[in-house]
């Protein structure tokens, strides 16, 4: 019992110094990949980069201690990071304090959901996400993740649109207008280093090498080059007018938001007081305020886009002062610094005496030194209710990724994987992670593979990984300041290349055409509805359930006869003649409310087609369960057939179904002499009784060989 509660105690059975050394080396190797990856994935999730390090701090340790896999490496992963961003986007601006608080709360919800599933032994619930759905979603997510990094690779900023493809169109349009080539080339350099090292030296931590080289290069060339200037230095009335209008639109939103809060309170009071007139007035005022807010947001977006399109050049004055002109309005002969400057504009108003300009590329910037303060996330029930559907999807997706990796590793190590214990480990990792300011984490395929290849024997390697992250947070955060954002984008692109699996669509189609179609539809819908990724998954799940229900509503009902080798086969598919007096019907699947009438319809059609029918034998080997509707249908069929002078018998009734027949007294109605253990035993008795001697000679069923052989 103690080892079930604390599974990590099993690690130390026969543990020695050599294994300790192997775990230490593996943990350090994984950390060298995890540190840059975690920062990249945090930005994918809409979080500041250093929150990725927080997610790489406690979750790996807790997941290893309480999970069942000894090599599974937990931490930030691409798909879960993308899902986090998609779920939080409607609630707050990415990177804001509110957004970060919601992300931490989401981690807590994901952890609680996974822990509950694990404790209740409901690991099989993940089967609702079928392989075709996951394949379609993963391929689409890989494309979405990769294309979402294009703005960082080109060094441009755009506002997000309602659909991801619209955002990418904006990125392309902005990149055509202006691409910051140093940003692009340093990102391409990072990507080239990772691809080259992966091919020629796979054991070298290519991500770390790319980060070190590009960070040093960024520091040496002064890659980041920002300035805050007085608006008077900007020699463009048009630009200053745009900034003023943008500020007016942005500053007009907070008062309206306060007014809306008061209106919402009035509306709630009117509802509680059952005052219909006051309620209508409050609802009208709320709609008007919301309309005004949306109008201001649209104006702010348009002005922001205009400001971003304006490119400036710095003219150095004789007194070493600097004036900024639009690039096409620069005075002839003016001395410049050779840079193109742009206004850095976000969601906040721009101070007229402190206009932020950028003449270089974007870097990580300041990473807070030290470990995060441990505290419980602020609980907000309304936000939790909004986040719960996303938390459920992230929980299932994250766990499915983790358990798939764990099983793949277990096939090589011979280790036994307990899905429910893994759910407990992942759940606790996210709960404890939320206390340490982490956003949702899961098992990583790439880092788990690195962990296994590096020689990890137990989960102690994950402890070493986390300790390395702690050391980095304590002592090395200043070294990360000059890490280019485009290199983090390249790291993400490199990581998601392995998620694209075109053969998965072909494989699903070959298995069943409808599985292939579901996979393709999940892929297309996920791309179409992005960033609302939950819609693509839910569509796939609904389609799978519909196929499942359809197949169970119309199970396989086969009419059997003998072929030339005297083997019982399907008469329809083989095009063989059936007996005119005796029909052998095989029913495949549970007999329940959704398909009971289907069996009844098949028997009715049979009676209409075979007017000479004397006996029906139902082969019940495939009926593994029966409910009240199925039992009632069988009872009515027995009465109906026998009243029509057609006898009915059953063979191969399993124990579960037999208990239902006995409890409902249908067993007595059918008659013990009409229920046979096997089909051949039934035919030995039924066939002669249903035929005259002359009919026996020409009957397609003929003699009854032993033992019984059934072909589909």
Image: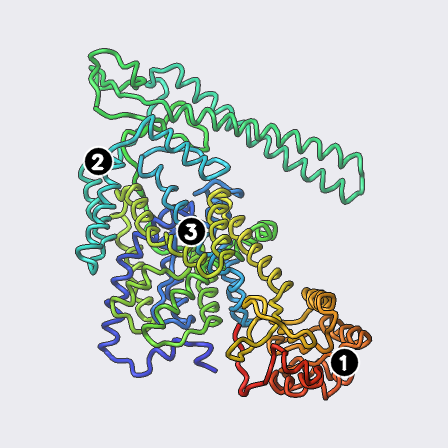
- Image coordinates for residue 545, horizontal then vertical, percent: 58, 59
Which picture quadrant has residue 677? bottom right
Tell me residue 210's x, y (percent): 22, 49
**Residue 632: horizontal and vertical position, in percent?**
76, 73
Mark 2 nearby-residue class (10 Å; few <14, some 14–19, many ≥20): few
Residue under label 3, please give it: 81
Which residue is located at x 45 percent, y 59 percent?
Answer: 398
How far apart are the two marked residues, 3 and 2, measured between alpha carbons?
A: 31 Å
> How crowded is the residue under tag 3: few (<14 C-alpha within 10 Å), some, or many (20+)?
many
The CA distance from mark 1 to mark 3 is: 54 Å
Dot 2 or dot 1: first in sequence order is 2
How much space separates mark 2 and mark 1, taking CA atoms? 85 Å
Answer with the quarter of the image where residue 28 lies: bottom left
Q: Which residue is mark 2?
A: 222
The answer to whether any part of residue 589 appears in the image is: no
Question: Is 543 or 670 nearer to us in this picture?
Answer: 670
Count numbered badges in the picture: 3
Labels 3 & 2 near each other (Cβ < 8 A) = no
SS state under label 1: loop
Q: Which of labels 2 and 1 is toward the front? A: 1
Q: Secondary structure at mark 2?
A: loop
Between circles 3 and 2, the one closer to the viewer is 3
The residue beneath circle 1 is 664
């Amino acid at each position: 019992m103690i080892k079930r509660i604390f599974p990590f105690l099993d690690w130390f059975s026969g543990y020695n110094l050599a294994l300790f050394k192997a775990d230490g080396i593996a943990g350090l190797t994984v950390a060298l990949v995890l540190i840059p990856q975690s920062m990249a994935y945090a930005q994918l999730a809409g979080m500041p980069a250093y929150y990725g390090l927080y997610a790489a701090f406690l979750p790996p340790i807790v997941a290893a201690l309480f999970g069942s896999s000894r090599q599974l490496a937990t931490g930030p992963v691409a798909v879960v990071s993308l899902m986090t961003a998609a779920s939080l986007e409607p609630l707050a601006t990415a990177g804001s304090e509110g957004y970060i608080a919601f992300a931490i709360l989401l981690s807590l919800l994901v952890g609680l959901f996974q822990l509950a599933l694990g404790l209740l032994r409901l690991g099989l619930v993940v089967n609702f996400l079928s392989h075709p759905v996951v394949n379609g979603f993963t391929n689409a997510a890989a494309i979405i993740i990769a294309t979402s990094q294009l703005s960082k690779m080109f060094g441009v900023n755009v506002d997000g649109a309602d659909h991801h493809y619209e955002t990418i169109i904006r990125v392309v349009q902005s990149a055509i207008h202006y691409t910051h080539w140093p940003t692009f080339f340093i990102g391409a350099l990072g990507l080239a280093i990772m691809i080259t090292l992966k091919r020629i030296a796979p054991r070298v931590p290519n991500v770390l090498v790319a980060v070190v080289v590009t960070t040093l290069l960024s520091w040496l060339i002064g890659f980041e080059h920002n300035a805050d200037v007085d608006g008077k230095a900007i020699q463009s009335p048009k630009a200053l007018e745009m900034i003023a209008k943008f500020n007016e639109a942005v500053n007009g939103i907070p008062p309206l938001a306060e007014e809306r809060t008061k209106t919402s309170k009035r509306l709630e009071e009117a509802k509680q007081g059952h005052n219909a007139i006051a309620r209508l007035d409050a609802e009208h005022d709320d709609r008007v305020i919301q309309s005004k807010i949306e109008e201001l947001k649209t104006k702010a977006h348009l002005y922001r886009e205009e400001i971003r399109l304006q490119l400036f050049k710095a003219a150095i004055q004789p007194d070493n002062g600097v004036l900024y002109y639009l690039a096409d309005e620069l005075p002839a002969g003016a001395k410049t610094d050779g840079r193109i400057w742009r206004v850095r504009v976000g969601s906040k108003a721009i101070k007229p005496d402190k206009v932020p300009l950028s003449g270089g590329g974007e870097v990580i910037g300041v990473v807070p030194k030290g470990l995060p303060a441990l505290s419980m996330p602020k609980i907000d029930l309304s936000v939790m209710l909004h986040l719960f559907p996303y938390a459920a999807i992230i929980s299932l997706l994250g766990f499915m990724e983790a358990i798939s990796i764990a099983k793949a590793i277990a096939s090589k190590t011979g280790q036994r994987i307990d899905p429910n214990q893994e759910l407990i480990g992942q759940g606790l990792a996210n709960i404890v992670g939320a206390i340490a300011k982490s956003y949702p984490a899961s098992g990583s395929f790439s880092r788990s593979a690195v962990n296994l290849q590096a020689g990890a024997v137990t989960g102690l390697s994950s402890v070493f990984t986390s300790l390395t992250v702690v050391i980095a947070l304590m002592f090395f955060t200043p070294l990360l300041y000059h890490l280019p954002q485009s290199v983090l984008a390249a790291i993400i692109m490199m990581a998601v290349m392995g998620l694209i699996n075109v053969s998965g669509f072909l494989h699903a189609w070959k298995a069943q055409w409808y599985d292939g179609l579901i996979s393709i539809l999940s892929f297309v819908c996920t791309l179409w509805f992005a960033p609302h990724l939950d819609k693509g998954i839910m569509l796939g799940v609904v389609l799978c359930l519909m196929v499942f229900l359809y197949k169970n509503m119309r199970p396989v009902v086969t009419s059997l006869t003998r072929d030339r080798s005297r083997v019982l086969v399907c008469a329809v598919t083989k095009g063989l003649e059936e007996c005119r007096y005796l029909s052998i019907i095989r029913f495949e699947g549970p007999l329940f409310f959704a398909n009971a009438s289907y069996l009844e319809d098949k028997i009715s059609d049979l009676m209409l087609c075979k007017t000479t029918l004397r006996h029906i034998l139902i082969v019940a080997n495939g009926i593994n369960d029966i409910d009240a509707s199925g039992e009632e249908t069988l009872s009515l069929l027995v009465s109906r057939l026998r009243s029509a002078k057609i006898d009915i018998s059953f063979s191969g009734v399993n124990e579960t179904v037999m208990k239902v027949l006995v409890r409902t007294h249908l067993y007595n109605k059918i008659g013990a002499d009409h229920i046979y253990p096997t089909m051949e035993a039934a035919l030995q008795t039924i066939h002669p009784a249903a035929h005259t001697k002359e009919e026996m000679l020409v009957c397609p069923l003929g003699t009854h060989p032993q033992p019984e052989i059934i072909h589909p």
